Amino acid sequence: MSSNPAARVRPAGPAWLTLGYAALLAYGTLYPLSGWRPPPVDLATLFAASLHMPAARADLLTNLLVYLPLGLLIGLRRRERGRGGAIAAAALAGLALSTVLECLQAFLPERTPSLLDIGLNGLGAGTGALLPFLVSGDTRLGHELARWRHERFRDGALADLGLVVLALWALAHLSPLVPSIDLGNLRSGLSPLWHTLHAPARFDPGVALAYLLAILALGWIARDLWRAPPRQFPPVFAVFVAGVQALKVPVMTRQLSLEAVLAAALALAALLLTTHWRAPLRWRASVAALIAAYAVEQLRPALDPDAPRHVFSWELFAPQMRSLDGLADILAVAWMFVAAAYLARRRWPAAGLWPGVLAAGGIAAFAFAFEWSQQYLPGRYGEVSDVLVAALAWLAAWSASGASTRPAGEAAR
């Protein structure tokens, strides 16, 4: 166990993250990058016509959200300019990138340029840059959030990364974040639970086991972050998990299943029994549960043995861009590898950037092996996109937590 009260590493600059995310935005906007041809009319006419086209709420929200991370990254690099300068720089960069990409869409027959998309992208980038200032100690909201956080969770960049893990897990279950109180949508949200209760053969033990292991890993990480009295942790975490499950019902395309309900109940009971575990044991349990959850999720076949098998897809983000659940699919992979980076930093807080880069190569190989094996499982779909998300999520989290500090006595060794 290290007795050094403060082990620090130099934080990696987020420039490569900004450029990498901008490249992903360009790829997603210009997908499928084929069939280029001159537009049938001039760009001004195309953009004017786009103002009269109907837009789905999910599309509007997606255009706003996908530029939030870009604005956040740009804002963090420009924060020395103050709030106004950082927000302006991020919004202008978002507008410029979006304008170029929307103009290029005019040359793709499968894509339609839109002025509304440009406006939402710029707004999303500006909002992303605003977020750090809203939660800073200079605002009343930020002061209250900081006080609330300090009373319940550990301080420091590493603890911040742990809280990001919790947020990503919740977002993975609540994306695309488009609620609807339409009776048909509410029935759809509860239909898996209802049908499985009336036909137990529908129950998928693989789904339940993966969910159980994931909540166990998440719970032990959350317990590691907790600084309030230990007895307060189980009910708070139970409310968090139950709240996410309940909110899935009104969200479009999301559903509540019996597997999720039973697995959550079992996981919360197990966490209640392990509340007083020491930090080293929680760390080992978190690592084991996280690896097992990922392996079970990747290797579980469909209940129907006659379900079709699919060849491995080398096309980046093709399924995600064809489905409203695309963001949820990405987040479902990302949160696990951000969690892995948190656990690794917990163990090796002073490691520099290059060990993380080398580990990212191992992460990519690890994820690729599981994705490749899915083409031999009925009903599964292996793809290179998840491999990229796994490696980038790990590397981004490892880099962002490079300035973390571990208090004395908190080593996970």
Image (cartoon, grey):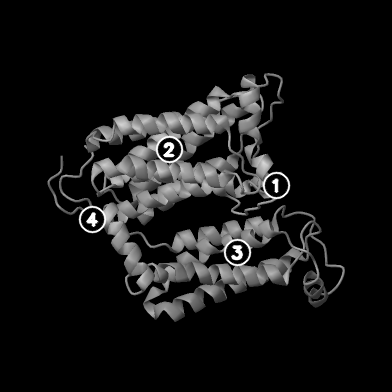
Going by the numbered disc 4, the residue's amino acid type is Arg
| Relative to 56, 345 lies left or right | left
Which badge, 4 or 2, is on the more N-terminal residue?
Answer: 4
Pick out the residue farthest to the left.
Answer: 3
Alpha carbon separation for disc pair 2 and 1: 47 Å
Q: Which residue, given by chain and number where applicable, does mark 3 sit on?
A: 64
Count residues near mark 2 (Cα–Cα under 10 Å), then give few for <14, some for 14-19, many for 20+. few
Instruction: Determine which of the numbered discs, if any, sits on residue 183 in the image.
Output: 1
Which badge, 2 or 3, is on the more N-terminal residue?
Answer: 3
Circle 3 or circle 1, nearest the eye: 1
Q: Which residue, given by chain and number where applicable, does mark 4 sit on?
A: 8
Going by the numbered disc 2, the residue's amino acid type is Gly
The image quadrant of residue 374 is: top right
Count residues near mark 4 (Cα–Cα under 10 Å), then give few for <14, some for 14-19, many for 20+. some
Which badge, 2 or 1, is on the more N-terminal residue?
Answer: 1
Badge 2 vs badge 1, beta-carbon distance below 8 Å: no
Q: Nearer the viewer, residue 82 or 180?
A: 180
Helix, strand or loop at mark 4: loop
Q: Which residue, given by chain and number where applicable, does mark 2 sit on?
A: 362
Which badge, 1 or 4, is on the more N-terminal residue?
Answer: 4
Instruction: Determine which of the numbered discs, if any, sits on residue 22 in the image.
Output: none
Alpha carbon separation for disc pair 2 and 3: 33 Å
